[in-house]
Image: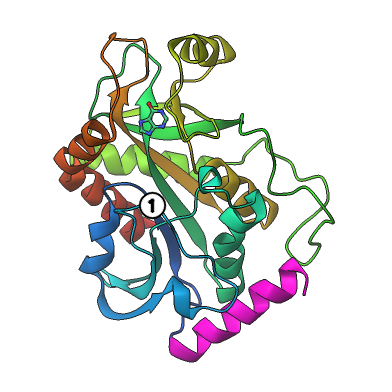
Amino acid sequence: MNIYEKCVQSAEYIKTLADANGAIGLILGSGLGPVGDLLTDKTVIPYGDIPNFPVPKVEGHAGELIIGNLEGVKVICMKGRFHFYEGYSMQTVSMPVRVMKLLGIRALIVTNAAGGVNRDFSSGNLMLIDDIINFMGDNPLVGENVAEFGTRFPDMTNALSPELKDLARKCAKDLGIDLREGVYMAFRGPNYETPAEVRFAKFAGADAVGMSTVPEIMVARHASIPTIGISCITNMAAGITGAELSHEEVAETANRVFNEFKSLVIELVKNI
Ligand code: HPA
């Protein structure tokens, strides 16, 4: 079975349980998982039940697709995502985005936790992803082009939707949120970057570094899904303050800004 056929099979199974046509896709990064619990009239589908879907391996990352209403708007949430550092291929990591496309999503919101490279940022800031740098050493679009989704050589000028970026700025302003903006550079992980790599990232034009999101954004762009990305700067990247990094710090900050992050995502969902 090729990638397209596998995605069709996954989508067909999901369609027997819930209708996500016209929904907004939401990929909930570290700490944002509880947003999935806010949905009403929801159908919860464990990843393990979906044919061809991989199952996440990282503790603390639940693996459920949740279809329902968020403040009256139909959404389909990925609670828990797949990471390249877990050993999955880039195609596998991004496959759920293609399934969501087949289910009929009209926009995609991707979220993550990231390390701040830009010294004007501080831990706890939210950052609108203006652009991305794929530094993962691989690419989800490699291999035979899946023409059912898009073209062989997709343009990445507007990988993140300019209209949705404007909307995010407006939503943040309305909510009184100090939304930063910048370039998100993805490393493969799973280790946090070295201080030298962070200096390199800064030199390359990055404002934040992380280990996810880029494959999903690339596949979404290939499939012409209007996409927006928001990072939670959970820590300053290695070498910036001299402090050592830990997953505990990342989780703690993500929890601290959960309410703000959640309100921004909800405001976006209501206005897209
Ligand atoms: N680097 C990479 N990924 C991350 C970081 C970081 O500093 N913080 C949260 N996710």
Q: Which residue is mark 1?
A: 58
- SS of the residue at dot 1? loop
Where is residue 84? Give x, y as percent.
Answer: 55, 45
Judge from the rendering whether residue 164 lies leftward or rightward of residue 170; answer left or right: right
Identify the amino acid type marked 1. Val
Q: Compared with residue 185, is residue 69 higher up or lower down, i.e. above or below? A: below
Magenta-span inclusion, residue 142: no
User: Position of 123 compared to 27: left or right?
Assistant: left
Q: Position of residue 152 (x, y in %)?
A: 83, 50
Stretch in magenta? 1-17
Question: Which of the four quarters of the rendered structure image does ligand 1 lie in?
Answer: top left
Residue occupying image coordinates x 26% and y 29%: 125
In front of the other: 146 or 40: 146
Give me the residue at 54% from left, 30% from top.
187
Q: Residue at x 85, y 56 (%)?
A: 144
Majority secondary structure of the magenta segment? helix
Q: Quick check: is 8 in the magenta stretch?
A: yes
Q: Quadrant of residue 210?
A: top left
Q: Residue at x 66, y 78 (%)?
A: 8
The total number of labels drawn is 1
Q: Quadrant of residue 138?
A: top right
Can you give x and y, in whole percent of width and height, for residue 157 in the image?
Answer: 67, 35
Q: Quarter of the image containing the N terminus?
A: bottom right
Q: Quadrant of the C terminus?
A: bottom left
Front residue of 196/209: it is 196
How crowded is the residue under tag 1: few (<14 C-alpha within 10 Å), some, or many (20+)? few
Does the beta carbon at disc 1 come under 8 Å from ligand 1?
no
